[in-house]
Every structure is written in structure tokens, then in C-alpha cells.
Amino acid sequence: MDSLPIATAVIGSLVVLLLVRRPVSASLGLFAFLLPFDSILIPGQIGQIHIHLTWLAGATAIAVLLTTGVLARRFGRPPRAAIWWSLAVFWAGISSLWAVDPDAALFRVPLLALLLLLYLIVASIRTTEKELQTVVWLAVSGGAAAAAVSLYAFARGEWWALAAFQHARLLYGRETLSAGDKVTDPNILGATLILPLSLAIGQLLSSRTRARSLLLMGLVAVIGASMCATMSRGTFVAMVAVFVVYLWRARAKWRLLICIPLVSILVLIMPRAFFGRLDAVLVDRGAGRFDIWQVGLRAFTHYPIIGAGLDCFPNAYNEFVHTGSNFEGFSRAPHNVFLGVSVELGLIGFFLLLGALREHFRLLARALRTDSDERRRMRFIAYEAACWGLLACGFFLDILWEQYFWLTLMLMVAAVQARVPSAVATNLRLWPDRYRHQVPSPLNVNAPSI
């Protein structure tokens, strides 16, 4: 008898049971757990569209959270950051009306609608700190599982590529995550692990028991080793950004000393080829990125205000590919979030994006200033560090419309919303005087005047 259907049925039953017992944490946590495996979890295809399992998990989370929020009356007013982000996404969607390639623009709109709806629900529903902690642990567990699987394959010689630097005569292979004919780009694998790494470090620095600290040290080591094995230079910059934010924000900086042995071990086990890739930045011109950016800047001057349309950077790039110092092929992606937004959505989209990011960081900053609980502050820092790390990685990779970046923004907002007491959460729409003194200042700023 085939055991696969039985195993599938058992796992499915457990997932349904968790969704019934813990609807908020289980639905959002399952979505977070699956994200590192997104590139290989493609169960089917409709026409030219590959159906990702994470899309189904996101749709399930929307249905569960929406039902829970309505029945339990847990919906409240979303913060100003959600309005800014919605405006940025709305502008991206309507850019399909004047897009250079309307088909390319419309192809992404359904996914953006799905993610925006999930984001708005998470930003509006009042989660508890316990529920959020469950989501965090599931996100860390998913990242650690993907890291462990990819490290095991890497140790067996299953590499992304085998190439040679002529100037160094160095053969190297980069870690990847694969299943059958589906393979994850090492740069994307490294980017998906930024959030789990930051969350694991935050949990480690706020841990109060030795057993939990040892477990988290192991998880941080596994995730960090996997990120190093991808040999992604953008991921390396992101890791540095994460540690810098912790060093900047943490009050008890002596706790960061616990990370020094982990960092030292990661440096020692780093493949020699990674340092060869660092040395080759100028030789290979950032794997051709410098030349792509040069052409992209030229394209921006042609579409400065409203842009060329969502997902139309490759089309705009082709128009000016002849202006580059070196030819890097046709229909290239921008490999830079800010350049890509500037070309596709113009200055309007660029400033909407900056405004949305600014509001998310301001939301967390207010929470950090007003919260005296160091353990909770460390969790806020984990979300902020993850977002800065992803933005640093975004200078070399297109992450803006990726689900792991959206999840980071969702958790940033949900962490602040979770500070609102449950008795207040059900009355936030009315904001009566007897509740007003219980509302923390990060949310009080956005309260309507009465």
C-alpha cells in the first residue's frame, strides 16, 4: 500500500486541526513556514501560470483570518503605514493601464491583490503576543528546515552551478534548494532566510533559559551557515545590516556578545570561493549588475514621472540596451528594488514606496521608544533588522513583490497591534474615553480626534 496518500492525509488532518484550534497563529504561521520552499513547492500549472503552494497557503490564511476577525469582532483600524503601502500597491496596479507591455503588467496583478488583502487583514486584526510568537517560531522553523535540507544537499555536491574565475582559476559551487527539476536561485534562497535569521537572533537575545538559548544558537548557526553557503554577496550585505541594527537598537549590548562565537564559526567555515566572489566584484562588475543599472538609469530618464508600467523594466531596458558599456543580454531584470520601481512606476511610485517604508519604521520606532520591556523590544528589533536586511539585499535583488518581504511588513505591523489589550481591541473602532488611556502611543497617534 502506498504510504504517500496516508502521510498526506495525516498531515492534512493535523493542519486542519491546528487551523480550528489556533486559527490566527496556525494560518499565518503555515504561510511563514512554507515561504523558504516557495520555488520548489509548485503542485500544478494553469496555462503558463505555475501555481505555488504558498499562494494557496496565503489564500487559506485570508479566509481563516477574515472569518476569525468577523466572528470574534477582532478587527480594528489599521495604522497609517497600511494606507501608504496600499497606495503604493494601488499605483503599481493601475500602472498596467499605460504599461509598455500590458500583458506583463497584468500577469502580476492577481498576486498583488492576494498579498495586499492578506496584508490589510493582518494589519487590521488584533493578534495577541502569544499568537505572534507562534508565527515567529514557525517562520524560524521553516527557515531552519530549508537551511538544513540545502546544507545537506550542498555537502553531497548538489550545487547550483560549477564555474571558474579565470583570474583566480577557482572552481566553485553554490548552495541551492532543489526538488526534482525545480531549483531555487541561491540569491533568492539567501534572501528568504534573512527574516528567519533575524527572528532567531531576536529570540536568542531575549531567551531566559539555557535549553532554549542552546536550541536557538543551533538554529542561528544552521540558518547562517546556509546563507553563507549560497555565496550570495547581497545576502552577506544583508547579514551585516541585520547585526548593525541589533548593535544600534539593543540596550543591553552585552547580550550581543553571545553572537560573536557564532559569527566567528561562520567566518571560519565560509567556503573559500565566497571570498573569491567578493574579490571579483569589480572584475565581473557585480555579475553584470553595474551595466544593467547603467542602462536602467538611462531608461529612467525616458519614463521619469509615471514609469513604464508594472513589470516592464525588461521592456524599457531593451529600448536602451545599446547605451550600456557592456552587453549583458536582452530583457534583464533590474536587480535593484529602487531602480526597478523608479523605471516601472516613476517618481510617483518611488516616493510612495519611500513613504510606506518610512511609516513602517516610524511605527516600530514609536513602539521601541515607549516600551520598557526589553524582551518585547528585542522582538521589535528583530522585525526592524529583518526589514533593513531585506532592503540592503534589495540593492542587488528584486524583492519588492516577493512574499517574504511582504511577510516582514505584516509582522512589523502585527507586532505593534499586539500591544493593544484584548479588551481595547474589540472597541477600537469607537475609541470611547474609558479605553483611551489603555492604548499605547504608537496607535494613539493615528486615532481619530473625538
Image (cartoon, helix red, strand yellow):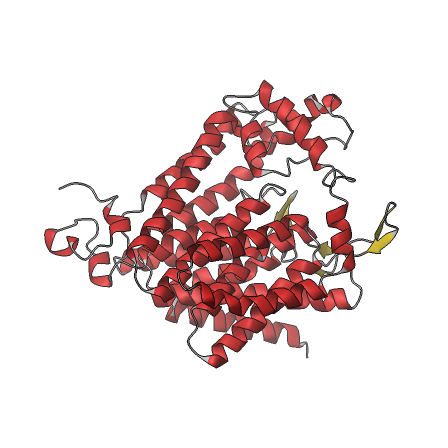
Q: Quadrant of residue 450?
A: top left
| Place of residue 392 in the rendered image (x, y in percent of width and height, measured from the top left) | 56, 45
Q: Nearer the viewer, residue 96 or 373?
A: 373
Is residue 87 shown to the viewer in this render? yes
Q: Quadrant of residue 362?
A: top left
Residue 25 position (above or below residue 170): below
Q: 65 left or right of 46?
A: left
**Total numbered circles:** 0
Residue 79 position (above or below residue 154): above
Residue shown at 11%/51% (left/top)? 433
Q: 386 left or right of 393?
A: left
Q: Nearer the viewer, residue 276 or 63?
A: 276
Residue 356 position (above or below residue 219): above
| Place of residue 301 in the rendered image (x, y in percent of width and height, measured from the top left) | 59, 20
Q: 357 left or right of 43?
A: left
Residue shown at 64%/55% (left/top)? 189
Q: Nearer the viewer, residue 14 or 178?
A: 178
Residue 399 position (above or below residue 195): above
Q: Quadrant of residue 292?
A: top right
Is residue 125 shown to the viewer in this render? no
Residue shown at 56%/65% (left/top)? 142
| Place of residue 184 in the rendered image (x, y in percent of width and height, measured from the top left) | 68, 54
Residue shown at 76%/33% (left/top)? 328
Task: Point out the residue furthest to the left here.
Answer: 433
